[in-house]
Image (tube, rainbow, N blue to C red):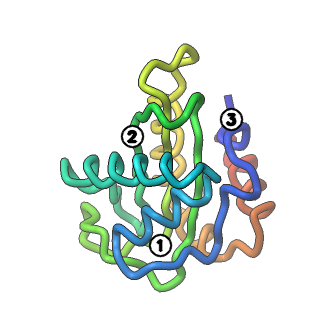
Amino acid sequence: MHLTDFFTPESISLALAGGGKDEILTGLVSLLGLDDGASDTLLRMLQRRETLGSTGVGRGIAIPHCRSLVVTRLRLAYGHHAAGVEYQAIDNRPVHDFFLIVAPPLEISNQYLPVLGKIAQFAKEPDVPARLAALGSADDFLRLLGEKGV
């Protein structure tokens, strides 16, 4: 299993817009191409998850995630926000890079936690924040994931 198996060019934005957590989550959800009802439901689930504790893992990276009935398989999206957003990250620094993970409640392939772990492992690599900031295209993002072997 590789993270590149779960991303499409449409689920990647190198110019994520928004000035706050809710706007960022809305932008990430829109990358999944769901209908309005499903998007609204998913946004509420992600907002609820964030009230339990920020998914900002530090080093300018956040991994918002949840399980929801609005998806039938594991879905990922990535967004980069050049200016950074206050996200209550564990290091109290702005977040620039967002990895969204959404999975159905009952997932036969059981990939949700392994994918979360792979993204967290990727985020800890020393050069990753700078490499993400320098991306020029969705293909560059996919190549970086492949190069890192996640």
Instruction: State the residue in front, 30 or 8.
Output: 30
Image position of 13 with respect to 7: above or below? below
Q: Upstream in the sequence, badge 3 or badge 2?
A: 3
Q: Upstream in the sequence, badge 1 or badge 3?
A: 3
SS class, disc 3: loop
Image position of 7 with respect to 20: above or below? above
- Percent from the top left, x then y, of residue 102? 49, 40
- Which residue is identified by label 3? 2
Viewed as shown, does residue 43 lie left or right of 150?
Answer: left
The residue drawn where x is 74% and y is 54% is 142
The residue drawn where x is 75% and y is 75% is 136
CA distance separating discs 1 and 3: 23 Å
Instruction: State the residue in front, 54 or 91.
Output: 54
Residue type highlighted by circle 2: Cys
Q: How many marks?
A: 3
- Percent from the top left, x then y, of residue 104? 48, 28
Q: Upstream in the sequence, badge 1 or badge 2?
A: 2
SS class, disc 2: strand
Give neighbour class at mark 1: few <14, some 14-19, many 20+ (Cα, 10 Å): many
Quadrant of image for the N terminus:
top right
Q: Residue furthest bottom?
A: 83
Residue type highlighted by circle 3: His
- Which residue is identified by label 2? 66
- Percent from the top left, x then y, of residue 20? 35, 76
- Which residue is identified by label 1? 96
CA distance separating discs 3 and 2: 20 Å
Q: Quadrant of residue 13?
A: bottom right
